[in-house]
Amino acid sequence: MIVQFIKKQLLLIIRNPQILLILIGMPLILITILGFALGSVMNGGEVSVKAKVAIIEHGDSDQELNHFLKKLESSKLPQEAKSAISQSAKQLLPVEQLKSEVLKNPELKKYISVHEIEPEALKETKDDDSYSVIIEIPEGFSEQILSSMFLKEEERPQLKLYRNEGKELTSNLTEDLLTSFQEQYSLAAKIGESDESILSADSMDTEVIGKVSNVEDREPLTSTAYYAVGMSVMFVLYIASNMGSFAYQEKEDHVFDRMILANVSIWKYFTSILLTTIILAALQLGILFGVCALFYGVTWPALGSFLLVTIALSLAVGSIGALLTSLNYRAHSETFSNFFSTVIVTVFAFVGGSFGEMFSSDFIRKIGNLTPNGAGMTAYFKLFQGYPLSSVQSELLMLVLFSIIILILAVLLFPKEGGTAK
Amino acid sequence: MLEVVSLSKRYKKNKAVDGVNIFLEKGETVGLLGPNGAGKSTIISMISSLISPSEGDVRLNNNSILTSPGKLRKVLGVVPQEIALYTDLTAKENLEFFGKIHRLKGKKLKERIEGILEQIGLAERQNDVVKTFSGGMKRRLNIGVALLHDPEILIMDEPTVGIDPQSRNYILEGVKRLNREKNMTILYTSHYMEEVEFLCDRIYIMDKGHIIASGTKDEIKSILSSESTILIKLDKSSPAFTEKLKELAFIKTVTSHEKTVTIVIPKEVHPFNQIFQLAEETDAAIVTIDRQTPTLEDVFLHLTGRALRD
């Protein structure tokens, strides 16, 4: 008999374009829009923005190094120190370091293109709107830096940085890189004063800013995967409110009476609502994830674990559907279903993280994980990143406990006497 | 066969049904007549075990069904006043679903569905979604679903509300046939007097939760055996004329509906002269005037002072 209920419900949903749009169409549209719109920010994959950087050098690094070495030779430092500083200075030539470690770093090649420009072309370059940043290196810059670092000369030279305000993102990116370089360069120089063995070019690897890297070297979470999960766990909640409304409509239309008159016990009916909601939720998740796998390449490394989380989440949705049915039957209206679909789902979606990490508070994150969509989302993310099933135990437990508590409430609230609509 | 004993239903302080007694013998068609809000649907819900009575009992073959309604439900078909169907499913899908919840399956279910579709005249539209049906077709399918499990007793709660005369006749003929050919016991509720007169052997008249009269059609009409009904048709509505009629001492009841005024008078009274005189005084032009034997409507009017459809 349960099969009949499920078949009937499927037919009713399939023939209702509005519900189909909410359950399947809307999440797919949102996955597509959000996944692609925020892809470059989240993915760490291709970044569509690229900074065009002009570098204008008024001096000559080799000549300036020679000037510094002569100055060093004439200083009163011990010969051993002179020899060490001489070695370090050759390795720490600031302009060369800037070029090789930052601006021409192979890892940064896709973010930055560097163009060396003759000093005479400065004005022309400034007028060229295609550049995000112009770095002007004054004459004697390298010599003064080295003198300041190793010979404690007071004068500290400065680079000139021209930012193109119209290219905020790329100019910010370049400025951040330069700041990072400056910090690391100063640190390396300081270390060099105390321990020359660390003073090597290797220790100055700059980190690539903008790439989302995973500390444990797991599969990075792409934005499409994020929203495939976020939207699916959110929109699956609408199955519960829809089932609550459908069930109430059955009472209003006296179809429920027909079932009672056919000697279908109220508990059989209640069970059919629960099971139908669970199956429809699993089916909806299956369709959404299936489409995402086919069209967006969002696939799951451990299918068994993925199915287990899907079942646990569907159980939770089923119990909500049963509770909403009980509440609607008690209230003789669809108020509870409507309130759930308009208010609760939205709150759950924000707190659970369906639209991204909206809150920095740990407390809210913990609350989010107590929502079925939040717990489901965390579990799906972990599985997507290749974590083992044991890592999602707490989420699974949370979903099962949630289902049990809500189901007990639903059973207690379901009217024990089948009867006509008021 | 089916007996309702001192049945009452109370909703907070309001008593919807008060001490009602009804019985149905095997194979008879019984009418339950009353205006909207009389308590007919509440009685039907209690008889069909959908709601519990506050007091009284419902017995099937002398056994109370209040604590174990299963036996009654097996032999009972209920046609609710509402269209209790899935309007997004086809006629056939509805019959299949309800047939299966009645535990019919396989060949038997298929045969029953085909039979019902023929019976209600929807065989050609069986694969159409119900929401595309006319009101009459939905009503017929509503009845068809109640007949799926071949019940012995059929309770019909105003099954012809809001449909065209053609569909209404189709349904009434169908009900008559069910009773005649299958010896089905039928409890038919309506506020259409003519339907009850056409279908029923015995009639219960209800008002405000009470049975106010019961018996065969002739028995009920005999309540007014000492009275006559006069039907006066005017060229236009005249409240002044109606008011003047009420002042005549021998007139028992006066009701008016648009251009028609109905009065009930003792049989021995011959009031035509006075009526014409009053019409002249109030400038009302009488088109026709007709003396009739009492109808059930007149009986209801006599008993309650109100028309059935008020």
Image (cartoon, rainbow, N blue to C red):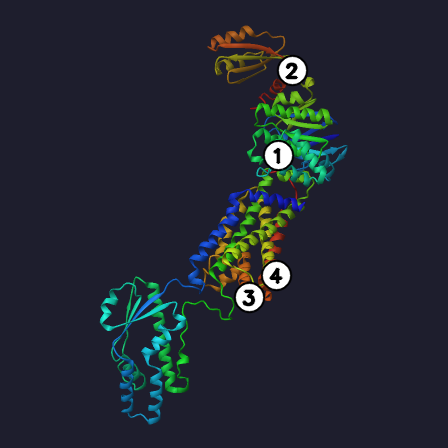
Q: To which quarter of the image does residue B175 belong?
A: top right
Can residue A244 be seen at all in this image of the molecule? Answer: yes
Kindly check if marks 4 and 3 are in contact, taking CB atoms under 8 A apart as contact.
Answer: no
Badge 2: residue crowd in 10 Å (few <14, some 14–19, many ≥20): many
Residue for badge 3:
A386
Q: Residue furthest top?
A: B273
Q: Position of residue A236 (x, y in %)?
A: 54, 52
Circle 1 sits in a helix, a strand or a loop, which is it? Answer: loop
Q: Amino acid at mark 4?
A: Gly
Query: What residue does disc 1 label?
Result: B126
Q: Is residue B310 above or below residue A316?
A: above
Q: Which residue is mark 4?
A: A304
Mark 4 and mark 3: Cα distance apart in space = 13 Å
Identify the secondary structure beneath mark 3: loop
Q: CA distance from mark 4 to mark 2?
A: 81 Å
Amino acid carrying label 2: it is Leu
Chain letter of mark 1 equals: B
Locate residue A92, reporting x and y percent.
35, 82
Select label 4 or label 2 by which is in front.
Answer: 4
Asked if residue A44 is positioned above or below residue B264 in the image, the reply reads below
Mark 1 or 3: in front is: 1
How far apart are the two marked residues, 1 and 3, measured between alpha carbons?
52 Å
Residue with the mark numbered 2: B224
